[in-house]
């Protein structure tokens, strides 16, 4: 049953008066306004200032950026210090090679997003690291790969989880970010999307190495091994980016997914603060939103990137859980871990260039 709203004569007068006053108020200055043009609030409670939007200008003014910085990692929980010299040199050669390539690209004005993707793609193809070729085995003897990437300019991100035939998961993660409205695709859906964007599948066996097969045999009766690769960068335009990729946990079961494809846990980038990539016990990084926590401490507590990374790794995580690499929007680099070692490297516009596994810088190949 329809009803019609009827106005009494007194209400018509009130409405007309309000409309008239509202129209007049926009044609000239408000006599009750302050010198700044704002009318004082009639409420006794002051109106709080608006919260800055995520696309507000970065803390570092545009034009100040001529610097760049880059940090990379090949996983925390480095091997024993008795590692034979040949293998040690092979690790250093690989890390130094991608670090030099990335540093040179940033120096030429390359974008941080391109650089972190390219570095992680190269490490995914290196069988020494637990990402892409060289990924660890699941308990069933297969490989399930995860990756994520994030652009600090607009907080765009892309990730994939549980892919089994994608040679470079980080490239697929970037495609998710740039070619879909989504952030995370997993399993068969991610594989279908890879084919749709023209990525040729590889057989799952392509990721296998004998060293990882031996790790599986050991892990079934002992503590599982983990590892990750990652890169964070600041380019000359002041843009931050982060990328992380992994084969996961040795002997993992039931489609287990760790922190590497989880934005805010294993990867994060925000031009207002920093870019972060993590490595370690994925469940702990997820529980504590580790990568985002570093950024949040900088934004909300005013900490430096070094202070924030140390607080999270040594104050929130437990001993042996892993570590992070981070670059601030001013080009400061923080590399913090609570394991015996961490495959890592760093360079910047000031000439820093180093690769480390334990405390001391490694001798670089010629």
Image (cartoon, rainbow, N blue to C red):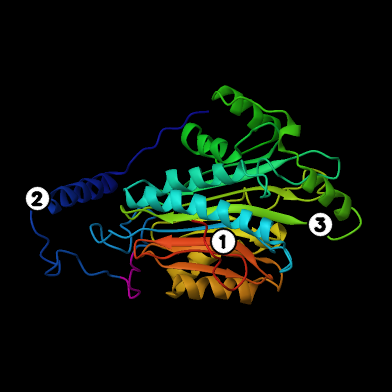
> Which is nearer the N-term, disc 1 or disc 2?
2
Residue 203 picture quarter: top right
Where residue 147 appears, x then y in whole percent?
61, 45
Q: Which of the pair 242/16 is nearer the observer? A: 242
Q: CA distance from mark 1 to mark 2?
A: 64 Å
Q: Residue furthest right?
A: 221
Q: Please check the rendered image and state whether residue 285 is part of the magenta-colored stretch, yes or no.
A: no
| Residue bounds of the magenta highlight | 43-49
Q: CA distance from mark 3 to mark 2?
A: 73 Å
How many residues crowd mark 3 within 10 Å: few (<14), some (14–19), many (20+)?
Answer: some
- Dot 3 falls on a residue whose secondary structure is loop
Residue 133 visible in the current orientation: yes
Q: Nearer the viewer, mark 3 or mark 2?
A: 3
- The kind of secondary structure the magenta stretch mainly shows is loop
Where residue 229 appears, x then y in whole percent?
60, 52
> Which is nearer the N-term, disc 3 or disc 2?
2
Q: Is residue 127 left or right of residue 4?
A: right
Residue picked out by circle 1? 344
Determine the residue positioned at 63% across, 64% down. 342
- Dot 1 falls on a residue whose secondary structure is strand
How many residues crowd mark 2 within 10 Å: few (<14), some (14–19), many (20+)?
Answer: few
């Amino acid at each position: 049953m329809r009803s019609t709203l009827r106005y009494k004569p007194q209400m018509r007068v009130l409405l007309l008066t309000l409309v008239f006053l509202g129209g007049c108020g926009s044609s000239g200055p408000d006599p009750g306004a302050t010198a700044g043009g704002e009318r004082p609030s009639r409420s006794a409670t002051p109106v709080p200032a608006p919260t800055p939007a995520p696309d507000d200008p970065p803390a570092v003014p545009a034009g100040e950026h001529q610097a760049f910085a880059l940090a990379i990692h090949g996983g925390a929980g480095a091997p024993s210090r008795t590692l034979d010299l040949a293998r040690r040199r092979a690790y250093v050669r690989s890390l130094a090679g991608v670090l030099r390539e990335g540093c040179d690209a940033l120096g030429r004005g390359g974008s941080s997003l391109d650089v972190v993707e390219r570095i992680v793609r190269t490490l995914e193809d290196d069988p020494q690291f637990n990402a892409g070729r060289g990924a660890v085995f699941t308990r069933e003897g297969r490989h399930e790969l995860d990756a994520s990437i994030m652009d600090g300019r607009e907080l765009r991100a892309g990730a994939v989880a549980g892919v089994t035939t994608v040679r470079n998961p980080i490239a697929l993660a970037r495609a998710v970010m740039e070619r879909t409205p989504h952030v995370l695709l997993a399993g068969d859906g991610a594989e279908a999307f890879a084919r749709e964007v023209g990525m040729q599948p590889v057989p799952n066996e392509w990721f296998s190495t004998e060293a990882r097969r031996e790790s599986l045999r050991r892990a079934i009766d002992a503590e599982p091994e983990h590892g990750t690769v990652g890169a964070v960068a600041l380019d000359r335009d002041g843009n931050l980016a982060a990328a992380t990729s992994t084969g996961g946990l040795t002997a993992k079961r039931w489609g287990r997914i760790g922190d590497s494809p989880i934005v805010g846990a294993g990867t994060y980038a925000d031009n207002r603060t920093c870019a972060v990539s993590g490595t370690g016990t994925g469940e702990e990084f997820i529980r504590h939103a580790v990568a985002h926590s570093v950024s949040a401490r900088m934004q909300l507590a005013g900490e430096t990137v070094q202070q924030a990374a140390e607080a999270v790794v040594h104050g929130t995580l437990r001993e042996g859980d892993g570590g992070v690499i981070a670059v601030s929007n001013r080009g400061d680099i923080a590399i913090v871990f609570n394991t015996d070692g961490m495959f890592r490297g760093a360079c910047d516009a000031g000439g820093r260039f180093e690769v480390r596994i334990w405390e001391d810088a490694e001798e670089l190949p010629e």
